Amino acid sequence: MIETVTLQSAHLFGDALADQHRFRYQQFVDRAGWAVPHFDDMEYDQFDTPAAVYLLWRDHAARVKGMVRLLPTTRPYMTDTLWPELAPEEGLPHADNVWENTRFAVDRDLAAPLRRKVTGELILASLEFALSRGIERYLLISPLWVLRGALAASGLPHRMLRQTDALGRWPVASAYVPVSEQILSTVREHIGIHYRVCDSGHQAARAA
């Protein structure tokens, strides 16, 4: 199950919100070498606001081991503010039906079958969340190798946009991914997960 966590609902999920900041530090500062803000081994930026939605996968010890952050493009978002070199040629979106999808990561220390399962569930959760909110397209920002691997593994249709080598140890790229019920169905078949993976956003978390 993928948990949908926001600033408003974080109290229902124990330490999950703080732990995703710790997980991000491990993945993006320690591992990827990104020059992004961090404090006390927690990575954060100015977009961790009440508008942000976090889709989290936690293990049996309630530790975040996979995540993605979603931001509406009607509010300040990362590509628009910090990484204009990754903007689509037609310009950056500012629309209710287009959201930014970033900070996608799955712990590389998980066993390979579980890592594939968590990756698939995060992708499906992103699609399920989008359909529940009337989102028709995601602007994805991610390390290039992660982006290519996740898109290929899921069978998601996509349009690669731009990439830059200026942000860390590996190139970072952008892509557009459309959302529809048909695409959700196709991805379910492709990765073999046929159940709903995203919680309603209102369920209480397990005890930490």
Image (spheres, rainbow, N blue to C red):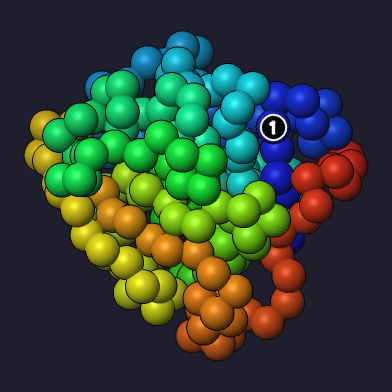
Examine the image and state in which quarter residue 78 appears: top left
Point out residue 135 in the picture as x, y percentages from the top left corner. 55, 52
- Say which residue label 1 marks: 6
Q: Is residue 186 above or below residue 111?
A: below
List the single residue furthest toward the left.
Answer: 165
Relative to residue 146, is residue 117 drawn left or right?
Answer: right
Tell me the quadrant of the picture where the N terminus can be found: bottom right
Point out residue 6 in the picture as x, y percentages from the top left corner. 69, 32
Question: Do we see residue 200 in this rendering?
Answer: yes
Point out residue 167 in the picture as x, y percentages from the top left corner. 18, 32
Q: Is residue 40 above or below residue 202?
A: above
Q: Nearer the viewer, residue 136 or 144?
A: 136
Tell me the quadrant of the picture where the C terminus can be found: top right
Relative to residue 19, is residue 7 drawn left or right?
Answer: right
Q: Is residue 22 above or below residue 49?
A: below
Label 1: element kind: loop
10 Å crowding of disc 1: few (<14), some (14-19), many (20+): many
Q: Nearer the viewer, residue 134 or 40?
A: 134
